Image: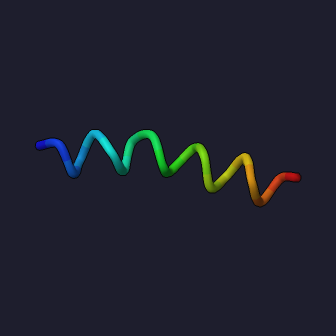
Amino acid sequence: MANLHKANIIGPLIANFGAV
């Protein structure tokens, strides 16, 4: 479950990084 939560945070984080 923790892994899923981590992906939920890293997902948008990577998307934000890609936008920059």
Q: Residue 9 at what x, y percent from top left?
A: 45, 40
- Which residue is at a point 48% across and 49% down the rendered structure image? 10
What colour scheme was applied to this rendering of the protein? rainbow
Q: Is residue 6 left or right of residue 20?
A: left
- Furthest-right residue in view? 20
Q: Residue 5 at what x, y percent from top left?
A: 28, 39
- Which residue is at a point 60% across and 46% down the rendered structure image? 13
Q: Is residue 11 left or right of residue 3?
A: right
- Furthest-bottom residue in view? 18
- Which residue is at a point 11% across and 43% down the rendered structure image? 1
Relative height, residue 5 to residue 3 (above, below): above
- Furthest-left residue in view? 1
Q: Residue 6 at what x, y percent from top left?
A: 33, 45
Q: How many marks?
A: 0
Q: Is residue 6 left or right of residue 14?
A: left
Q: Is residue 16 left or right of residue 4?
A: right
- Which residue is at a point 67% across and 52% down the rendered structure image? 15
